Amino acid sequence: MTRQASIPRFSIVTAVYDVQPYLPEFIASIEAQRVAPQDLEVVAVDDGSTDGSLDLLHEWARTSRFHVQVFTKPNGGQGSARNLGLGHATGEWVTFTDPDDILGRDFFRVAQAFTDAHRTLGIMASKPFVLDESGQAKPDSHPRRWQYEPANRLANLQEEPNVFPGSSSVSLFRRDLIESASLRFDDRVQPNFEDGHFAVRFLLSLPAPEVGLLRDAHYWYRKRTAGTSTLQRSLRDPRRYTDVLEFGYLDVVRRARQQLGSVPPWIQQMLVYELSWYLAEDDKVTSNAFVAPDVALRFHELLGRILRELGPEVVAAHRVRTLQSHWVDILSHGGSESPWHAGYAVRTTTDTRMGLQRLHYRFVRDQPREAFEVDGVPVLPAFAKTRAYRYYGADLLLERILWLPVGRTTRLLVDGADVHIRDEWPRLPAPGRRRSRGRVRRLLGQPPGQLLRKVTAKAGGARRRIVGLVQRRAARLWPWRQRFRGAWLMMDRIHDADDNGERLFEYIRSARPDINAWFVLERGSPDWLRLRAGGERRLLAHGSLAWRMAMLNCSWLLSSHADMTIYRPPQLARSGTVTRRFAFLQHGVIKDDLSHWLNGRELDLFVVSTAAELASVAGEGTTYRFTHKETRNTGLPRFDRLLATQRAVPAEERNLVIVAPTWRQWLTLPLASNSQRRELDDAFWGSEYIATWTALLRSPAIGEAIARRGWRLGFMPHPNLQSILGQLELPGYVEPLSFAGTDVQALYARCGLLVTDYSSVAFNLAYLDRPVVYFQFDREAMFAGAHVGRQGYFDYERDGFGPVAGDLEAAERAIVRSIDGGAQPDAEYQARIDATFPVRDGGACARVVAAVEELSRPYRGPVA
């Protein structure tokens, strides 16, 4: 295309790097713009792409109805590419659209009309939407969506500090004002926030921080499932935790102080918004963030400086994101250099059976002095601990958790002053300005498919409420109450058993017939058929009417798993207040930090098995919210049968090498609704995981050692990966070991060596004094938050029950050495086993039952 003679109204500057799959949609959205060809130009800068992005850009330049210029440069980051493009832009207005996003077809037409009406305006922002990887739109799901209502409008950030757009990709800037202020993107601000840094500096250059908010100009952000976008990749870039804070956030603070004498609320609100994403990411069960210890130190130094710039009243006025109550306290007081505590405490639950109430209050730095009165009588907590809110390795907020006796009146004094007790955590008003006017019109104006989904969802909600009411009333009928009142329901997974739930059920049925015990399992599963064949009749089919009635009448549900499908099954949603208690019997010994997952569960009993595990959960200063009230060191119920099974196996029959790797969060799909079965991701079969474990199983050295010793080799992947057993081509000497229908404890009793990576199965074999080899070729990914849980108290090198191998060759050597040495740990590892399990008496089931019964009656311990 030839260069147009007149100056275009708009320029798009886009920085392109390895976005070939997304460029066609981006280009199509530009070509669909309803503006004249002379009103729009595109400056595309290829930032050293390694795919076919540059070829697509050149093809576009040859065929576009707009003037498209293409430049290329070595990879240097988005900011440097935008700066190059900005130097070639000629439009009155410029925007920095990302090449994997999409513009609504009226984007520039709306902007053109708005600028015609507001000639002195310097910056506009379009309304952002979210587009997921499948191409499905998520209307009105962006946290800033509300600031664009009710129509295209002007906003003064001094009056509306929450509406700062903060993104150069959704914003349009007057190019002459950019040049007069000598603005360019700062290359030091990487890998993110270069947008916000540029926009803040632009606004500070204006006489007044006015922004045009364009409700009718739509910008579609693409959210990539694969995690390959610049923003998603940035979570593992150390500069996000150092340079962004120093050269980005603190730089705009410094500039504001120099120009205005203080940091205005609109900049503070921008900082609240930005920092909330750091907190949210590290709050996830599976976080994409990873910060090395030296980087974390610098991060917290810079974070403290930023937090001290935030006024508590500004944080409390935030209306963009829904802030968790602990985020509000961190953002308001986490940077305080002197002690602080909240002026209120929260009563989160009352244990009516034990006669105890749970109170929480938060503080920073030194723990305050405490005093308690119930009905005018001084008391001491029955149970108490301090919980840490830990982010990126540092405790930003502390919380006291106190179990006090129930009374008519409760008084809590902190540092000598009365603290108000409330029944829920304070909540900020919901973000945005919701208006009912025009709601029906907007609803009816949606695409038919989207409207149908919303109507169907509402109808489904009504149906669930009706079903819940019917279930609630049916459960009160005499036959059901007579059958299940006060019952203990036990289970493992929905679709299989043979874990702590079944072992406890087995014990109770033989030793405690006075307890109304039932076992829950999927009808027709291999373990259901096994138990039925063995004569067991107190089985409840998961999902059946009897199961529903039992769940609504029982006093305890005890399970080795705490997934929401077990803990809060969707079939019982809307069926009234839950009165049953939940005991987490555990699937194994916890060695990692699972607090981000388990803190979301209301566990009335939390079974642990070692002193170190107990300290990691209920101890002072841990990240778990559970105290010694809930957490009891009973040992796992299956340990009792494990010991008994071992005694029946002669030493010469302990000749099975079990290879038992655990699963990987990044190689499985999310759980389907009402299921505990995980499907494999498409990337599984081409992964390093499957290639490495297959190579180990095919190792000639290991095969020869097995043959030399006359042993057997079995492959037993985690239950989430059992489906691969029938699809692998393995040597003839490798036996596939399935959990379904198998007496797993009998396998453990015959085990002479366990080879695993991170599985808690190692504790089972250590309990039997068997050697272990840990094969951890992907240790960095597992400990960087890519899997469920974070690294906890357990260090494999220091605390493990066998050698740790980081590559295939080292694993082969350790396995061959152990096979040749027989089914006995080396002295160093035997000492660790003995320290971990000083008591192995076969009494775990009895202790669990005693703990349940103790938690079912009034507390009689000292509290005065």
Image: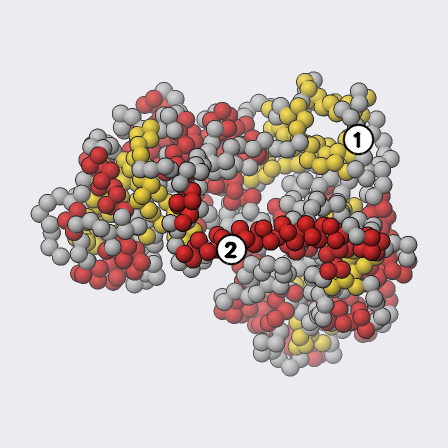
Inter-mark Cα distance, 2 to 1: 47 Å
Nearest to viewer (mark 2 / mark 1)? 2
The image quadrant of residue 542 is bottom right
- Taking the spot 70% from the left edge, 44% from the top edge, the residue there is 577
Residues packed near mark 2 inside 10 Å, few (<14), some (14 to 19) or many (20 plus) = few
Say which amino acid is labelled 1.
Pro
Task: Looking at the picture, tell me which residue is in the foreground, 345 or 734.
Answer: 345
Q: Look at 73% across and 23% down and name the residue there.
A: 411
Q: Is residue 243 visible to the viewer in this orientation of the structure?
A: no
Q: Badges 2 and 1: C-beta atoms under 8 Å apart?
A: no
Q: Amino acid at mark 2?
A: Thr
Q: Which residue is mark 1?
A: 405
| Residue at disc 2, secondary structure | helix
Q: Which mark is residue 456?
A: 2
Of callouts 2 and 1, the N-terminal one: 1
Residue 572 on image: x %, y %: 67, 53
Q: Nearer the viewer, residue 102 or 507?
A: 102
Residue 482: percent from left, percent from top: 85, 53
